[in-house]
Amino acid sequence: MELETDQQPSSGLRRALTTWFARLPSWFLLLCAAFAGLVLLAPYFGSLAAVARLLAWIVGILAVLQFARRAFGASPGATADAGRDTPAIETLGGRLLVSGKAISRKDMEEQLRRLAFHDPLTLLANRALFRDRVEHALAVSKRSERGVAMLFVDLDNFKTINDSFGHSEGDRVLSATAQRLSKCTRSGDTVARLGGDEFAVLLENLASQEPVVEVARRIVAALREPFPFLNSDLCVSASVGVAFATRDDGVEDLLRNADTAMYSAKAQGKARHVVFIPEMPDVANQRLQVEAEIAQALTENQFQLHYLPIVELRSGYLLGVEALVRWRHPKRGLVAPGEFLGIAEGSGQMIELGRWVLRQSCAEVKAWQARLPEGRQVRLAVNVSVGQLSDSDLVGDVSRALEESHLDPGCLVIEVTESVLLRNTESMLVKLNQLKKTGVRIAIDDFGTGYSSLAYLHRFPIDIVKIDRSFIERLGGVEDGAELARAIITLGDTLGLEVIAEGIEHEDQQRELVELGCVAGQGYFYAKPGPLQDLEQSVHMKLRRTMADTLPEGARFTATGRFLVGSLRRSEPEPMATGTFGPTSHK
Ligand code: C2E
Ligand code: MG
Ligand code: MG
């Protein structure tokens, strides 16, 4: 490895001399000094040639200086020894820097060794050193009969932190995580950063399994605490996989088992630890397989769209539909988005999939609108991911989808999640404003579940707020259950935003929402998502009945050209495949 120094090289002769002197042993230098002393005293012993005297002076002085340098370290003579100067590697704010400060060769070697085996950001052991330690621990354990365990630690919401606060804050979170991990472990344990937001801990010389589980618990608890410097209640939380080494395990086996247990912890709801058992599926591999399958599904048109009606609560009019992607998997049948969107987002495939959803839904809804009574329009809501908004030309994609389908831009609503608000950056604001300029409206989805400050709301060009299902669940019975929903509805009113309640499942929830002044809603009480033809058929059927004035009992209101809530009820949609592809939204 080459390191740069800001010191000037010394002259060739001086360097040659100093190098030569540097190599001389101390006893020889002392001998030279003694010889010089003898020569200086020569007049008292007889006559010597002037040349020999001059030589003796030079050799004597250099010898004394060199000796003094060795004896006292940084003596004046040492600074002249530029040929041996080496730059020091310092850490500043957790990063490695190179400066021109002179240090000894031993220190230099030590620093280079640290550089090769430690993660520069957190200063923890890196993957190479960790593997080395695990190998050693496994070898020792075979002789000593003492146990070895590994913890695989993966942060749960790290992507949200990076997306919301930027990479420099992300780095601070990683450094703080490293400190918390070190505090949770004993002095003999090895804590390592394997890369990204993945950490690992090696515990050796174990008499039982309890201390390992205790360390895993401590880690999960420590990472549940918010990071004060983020100025947010956002907790990162960690999923921890625990694996105990068996006699035949090598480094790879132990790493894979701990990783598998970690994925299982994610699949069980994150922020927990799970101990590996051999029956666990190899989820990391499955994830790669799903990525390959998604790529194939994109080329073979295996994705399709279901639509969820959005209604006006008081009257029951159909206001529009929300497009929800489904995967018609050749072996597994219909697969819900929660099972593959996280993987698609992680692999970058969400951008292509999202583009398809936009184009397809605009085309399908435009075709439907053409079959509606004249002047009647329904709006279309399309979900977009944070990655689509930040890493792709979403404005271009939306414009193209509108252009190709001839859908009125006023009919299109783009739903983004709350974490977008947290990315309180100029570029996000610019993107959302550009999006608005295309004529579409913007909705904040699942409002209340993220960590956005309500104060951010007015900064962004938002038209609609969708109250998350978790707040609607509390309605219709639970004391004080309506407080949060009421607060969001009032806030929406104050800011002039439309509020849509998500996940209405019961009539009393609908009633309470109407009392609270909520205008629109969606949920299984009205209909489950299904293909557009199903929705269209039931709507048309009811429309005809309505015109013939044959309303079913309990229906409240109808008007020509508008649709009835009750009319949206239809046969149960096709069940979706159960089981899992492994982790869903892993980050
Ligand atoms: P979302 O946008 O909040 O969509 C509503 C989800 O709640 C849908 O789940 C819907 O089926 C479900 N839901 C609606 N009413 C009820 C109810 O009364 N009770 C219950 N228990 N659930 C209800 P789904 O289709 O599984 O979608 C889940 C999430 O996946 C969506 O949440 C959305 O965030 C995301 N998603 C779906 N399609 C897309 C897409 O095309 N692009 C992107 N980026 N995300 C999508
Ligand atoms: Mg949505
Ligand atoms: Mg939602």
Image (cartoon, helix red, strand yellow):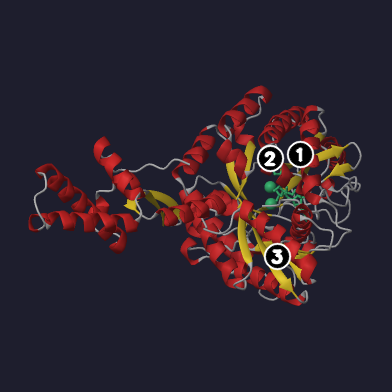
Q: Measured from the top left, where is residue 449 in percent x and y?
A: 63, 59
Quadrant hosting residue 6? top left
Disc on res. 67: none
Residue at x 46%, y 54% (from the top left corner):
111
Disc on res. 291: 1
Q: Of circles 3 and 1, which is in front?
A: 1
Task: Please state which amino acid type lies under the numbered disc 3.
Answer: Glu
Q: Which residue is more in the foreground, 375 or 205? A: 205
Is the CB atom of the residue marked by disc 1 within 8 angstroms of ligand 1's nearest atom?
A: no
From the viewer's perspective, is 122 left or right of 574? left
Q: CA distance from mark 3 to mark 1?
A: 43 Å
Label 2, on which residue? 347
SS class, disc 2: helix
Label 3, on which residue? 512
Q: Are marks 1 and 2 in contact (CB under 8 Å)?
A: yes
SS class, disc 1: helix
Q: Measured from the top left, where is residue 300 in percent x and y?
A: 82, 28
From the viewer's perspective, is 484 left or right of 539? left
Q: Which residue is more in the foreground, 423 or 305? A: 423
